Amino acid sequence: MSGANRLGGTLPPEFSHPVIDRTRPVRFRFNGRAVSGFEGDTVLSALLATGVRIAGRYAGNVVALDEHTAPPIALEGNETRPDLAMPMAICPAIDGAAFASVGPRPAVTRTLTARLLPPRRDTLGLAYKTGSAEPGGWIDTEAARRITADVAIVGGGVAGLSAALAAARRGLRVCLVEKEATLGGLSVFFGKAEGEPVPEDTISALASQIGESGLITLSLSTMAFDITNAAVQAIRVNKSGGLPQPERLSITADTIVLATGMVGRMPIFSGNRLAGVDEASAAWRLAARYNIWPGGSAHIHSATNVGYRMALLGAASGKSVVRTSDPRVDPQTRFIEFCKAHGYRLGWGMTVGSVAPNRGSGLSVHLANAENGAPAEEPIACDRLIVSGGWQPDLDLWLKASGTVKWNGAIQALVADGSLGGIVLAGSVAGYLSLAGCIAHGGAALETALDGKERPVDDPRIDPVFDTPDGPMLATSPAQPNAAAAFVAPGASGMLAAPAARGWPRFPGPQQDRTGASLAGPLNVLDVVGEIVAQRLDPALAPALCAERCVLPRALEKSADPAPFSAHIADDIPLFLEHRFGAGQKQWFLNAGQQRHFDPGCLVFANTDHRSPLDAIGVVLADEGGKIRVLLAKMAMSAGDTVYIRDGLTVLAARLERAI
């Protein structure tokens, strides 16, 4: 079964050197089922290769198995040991091992028909509380190994390698961690640009120098998940006695270089998290690292130039490319010219309106006019939809280290804003796009971190006449009742839900959550970007939201220290609002002058120009039958004066009625 989703035969060069060894098969068990793979597979890649493409359900929606939904795992018998939990995406598939998922529980089969049918082999059948897997126990586990270095580098792409070599040339001790099992990041995926060296040759040369240096410690298949107290917190999985063993690392360094690269964005459309819908860079990684390419046919939808490479690579691997589509009008790039030479059917000015499972197998892709939303005449039947919706700098660790961000509307991305003592960004995460620019900036960023002096770095770009800039990321709400939700990002809880069906439902079963599942719980950068693109979040609020919510949901421990606040707290004011608006804060009743309900938590401002939560002068406590009870800061205002309540993107005026 493992071979059904693997590439075979003559493959293009970048798919010809996977990390798996097909001469060494492995077999293990996962949640009681038999899984086969090869030496070099992770548990996640082996499951995907075996045909397990669905993680389970969230809010009534089927969600695909990927790095976002892959649950933490442990060896059978260790499920209750948080210190022995492992990330599925980096845990090696080991022959004879028996693994169990930790976190999301198997969904309860409710209908008689479902109980009588044999269990589906393509799903883990888990029930998710949020749009991604629950965090693993390693985030609350003390480090078992502590490493001290002069420089810690996260990311083994060309920028990270260049930074490591620059530090070694200064005689500094370096520890470099990389999540993948290979070096180079996405450089090969982006391909060779005119005037640049072949990415594979560049990576090989840099890796060779890394190996020759006696000052650089390299840790592959190691996931950095936090930065605290000038230390990178990470986890890796070692083999010990023939079984996997998680190892928590804490790497303390005077200088930390984040060369974390970029992450691919997923356009927002109905069905964008169904099995078979893959973001282009994630699809490339599966093919290049593990030779995984499910199905025989694919549709490529790309708002970027590099996305078209998946059409070329798929065809070179013996796959059928049904069609390509692009929201841009007449885009120009060398990759599109190659597609034309192959005779692919190209469609400009089109977006994905929706995707649904096809009867029998595969997907039914419905395109629409990118400008007016008019649907295309016929759906496209294919086994797989590969989508490239643009790029977002991977600022996850930057935010967890208390770095700040701002919205760049020109590229529809959050970018770093300001600086952090002892921490610098390098390469594409800092906005550099060319291979030469990323290499040069890796070394320059390291030097800047050491002496504080900014250095100019050339980042050559192809003329837009010959290489059209990436198109916008688009959002399309589900149009039909019972259609799959449109998630705002991979792994997100936020979604644009389908409209409710009229009348009585024909069949009982899991009901889709139609609340929109907005900004609840911890977030990541892609969640925030998706909410902005979906026009559900004011970009001006993004920096404060990221600072508040892009965090690790660690377990809270009871403190032995006495409470630092006054023992007297009003019964009708939540504890967390004590002194929120100053020592003189008081409650008021407001009159909004119109029939509208305000939920607790809506912020109150002195004028309509203010948007940031930091500028709020109060907050709604309760809506008591038309009278709005709020908590306001002490200020020179009296009954009859006007304040403004912000409810999402809506701002409404209200009069101060009386103090309580």
Image: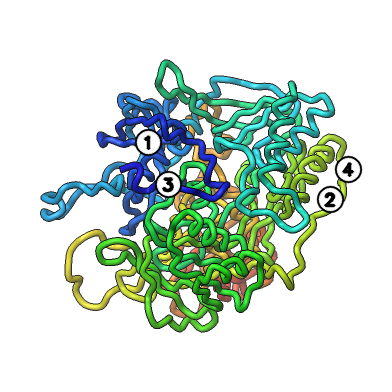
| Of pointers 4 and 1, the one earlier in the residue sequence | 1
Residue in the foreground of this view, choosing between 650 and 349? 349
Provide the secondary structure element on which disc 1 rests. strand
Quarter of the view holding residue 82: top left
Q: Mark 1 points at which residue?
A: 37
Horizontal side, residue 476 vs residue 109: left or right: right
Q: Of the residues shown, which amino acid type is indicated by label 3?
A: Gly
Q: Do the residues labelled 2 and 3 touch (CB within 8 Å)?
A: no
Q: Of the residues shown, which amino acid type is indicated by label 1?
A: Gly
Q: Of the residues shown, which amino acid type is indicated by label 4?
A: Lys
Please tell me how crowded label 1 is: few (under 14), some (14-19), or many (20+) other residues with Cα within 10 Å. many
Give the label on residue 8, or none: 3
Camera-side mark, 3 or 1: 3
Please tell me how crowded label 2 is: few (under 14), some (14-19), or many (20+) other residues with Cα within 10 Å. some
Residue at (26, 66) in percent of width and height: 359
Provide the secondary structure element on which disc 2 rests. loop
Residue at (48, 31) in percent of width and height: 138
Quarter of the view holding residue 192: bottom right
Q: Do the residues labelled 4 and 3 touch (CB within 8 Å)?
A: no
Give the label on residue 457, or none: 2
Provide the secondary structure element on which disc 4 rests. loop
Residue in the foreground of this view, choosing between 200 and 82? 200
